[in-house]
Image (cartoon, rainbow, N blue to C red):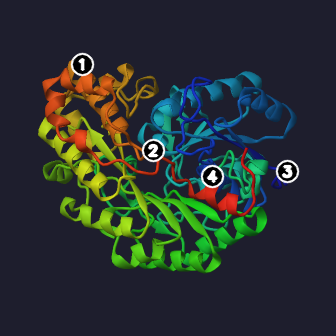
Amino acid sequence: MSVNKNMKVLLINPGHEGAAEVKHVVPHRFHRDIPPVSILTLGSYLRQRQIEVILIDTHIDGNYRETIKRIIQTEDICLVGLTTLVGKFIRNAIEITEHIKSIRPQLPVAWGGALTSTLPAACLKEGRADYIILFNGEEPVRQLVEALAEGRSVDSVPNLGYLKDGELFRTAVPQDQTIYDGVLAWDLLGANINVKQIPYLAYIFSSRGCPYGCRFCYHQMTSAKGQRKCLFRTADQVLAELDFLNKNYGISVFTFGDDNFFSNKRRAVEILKGMRERGYYIEQAIGTFSDFNDEVIAGLKGICQTVISSIETASPRLLKVINKPISLEKIPAIITQLNQAGINSIHNFMFGLPEETDDERKAAVDLMVELKAINPYVRGMAYFFTPLPGTPMFDDVEKQYGAFPATLAFWADCEIVGLEGSYIFRPWLDMPEQQFITDFIELFKNIFQSINQPLTPEQEAQISGSPRLQKIFSGVQGINHPKDRTQKYLLDSVLKKQGVRLD
């Protein structure tokens, strides 16, 4: 049988909120969301190989159930693909899969993403996925589509999982995996990609993976260590993508979503040099403190508004536990350099780590007070540590407290904030202690906003009502505040200078 030249795939981003519960909160003046880069990358690869692709993002399509129904009833779709991760992604992926099956029961549905490599059997049995894609999905999905179109066995498709006689069956995993590294097919997003970047940011991934081995990170959510390679696109490839977006959509301000844009410092400097020559700007980029050297900061000066650099913990002891490669002593000097270059910074912290003490939480508060004194626009974000299945820290917790259920029903409630339904994921903390840390985290985030203000009477009362909070937050009353109360949005400023009106 010849290959069906009308092969068509529907790719869906199921989102990480509950269906129609809340709108995804993003730190921009206008609602600008992150595009579904994972399925956009996959879609670009498939289109390059003559497979037609349709994308649906539940973040921005409020009527996505009807959209899905219309497409699978009117289009010759041969496969639906969904990306998944721990948390409400699971619940939404299950809901969407059931919706598809209720309309076209025989239409194959494939799940991809980190979850499938960690809980493969559960994705098939509970999630009702027909197939799971393990690790990088470009070539497996291409071969799966062609096999389905030809009506032949899928056993030769690499990195594939499905049920045989009710049990998980995995096909071979190739040693070298093919990934898409060209210019993304941004037109798959239609009118949602535009110069105003509403609703989507021009969100660029110049690399895949991370060279560091933080023991809590989602990059560790796989049992196959050989799949954790950090892959870098060349500076020329990245600049070609920026040029494409500039030529076709007039975009000149970009956000880099790499987990560590600066880990290959020579390449980063090349990209920054090319952006400066072209008159391009960076709204935000993510990096580790150990990668901010003089040359990188000089490259960022004048073209970058904000860098995001996670600290996770201000405890030298806990940094070793989580294997975070930063030196706390060097952070103030780096923030000083960034501030002198006109660059603001955002810093993420994790609290509630096993055996974490109030003194270690206070160290984070003290560090943020110090950084605010250097640059009042510095922002501190905080999250509740949650062990992700398949990571080394998850293994540590299971060894000490027993195995977690390997079910989707269990992991669908997993959150990195202190919600009541997520307490079961932290067995080293009792309920009162988790509530205390939840309250502490909310105070931390509110006190260390980029445009912060003196403590409110409610915050003062909350702190004074707890001896522990009094100790942890001692010294915050004199925290530095920005004199200019205007939020810094580089994208809006550039658009305004270009005469683009933002309503």
Measuring 39% from the left and 62% from the top, which residue is drawn there?
Answer: 287
User: What is the quadrant of the C terminus in the image?
Assistant: top right
> Looking at the image, can residue 156 be seen?
no
Residue extending farthest to the front is 483
Residue 312, how many percent across, how many down? 28, 48
In the figure, 333 relative to 496: above or below? below
Q: How crowded is mark 3: few (under 14 residues within 10 Å), some or many (20 or more)?
A: few
Ranked by sequence position, the earlier of labels 2 and 1 is 2
| Alpha carbons under labels 2 and 1: distance apart | 31 Å
* Location of mark 2 (residue): 117
Ranked by sequence position, the earlier of labels 2 and 3 is 3
| Alpha carbons under labels 4 and 3: distance apart | 31 Å
Q: Inspect the image, locate mark 1, and give the three-letter code of the amino acid beneath it.
A: Met
* Location of mark 3 (residue): 6
* Location of mark 4 (residue): 201
Q: Residues within 10 Å of mark 2 (few under 14, many from 20)?
A: many
* Local secondary structure at mark 3: loop
Whether the residues at callouts 2 and 4 have beta carbons within 8 Å, the answer is no
* Local secondary structure at mark 2: helix
For the residues carrying marks 2 and 4, which lies nearer the camera in this image?
A: 4
Q: Inspect the image, locate mark 4, and give the three-letter code of the amino acid beneath it.
A: Leu
Q: How crowded is mark 4: few (under 14 residues within 10 Å), some or many (20 or more)?
A: many
* Location of mark 1 (residue): 431
Considering depth in this image, is 425 or 191 the residue closer to the camera?
191
| Alpha carbons under labels 2 and 3: distance apart | 30 Å
Measuring 63% from the left and 43% from the top, which residue is drawn there?
Answer: 30
* Local secondary structure at mark 1: helix
Residue 120, how many percent across, how many down? 47, 38
For the residues carrying marks 4 and 1, which lies nearer the camera in this image?
A: 4
Ranked by sequence position, the earlier of labels 2 and 4 is 2
Considering depth in this image, is 387 or 18 the residue closer to the camera?
18
Q: Inspect the image, locate mark 3, and give the three-letter code of the amino acid beneath it.
A: Asn
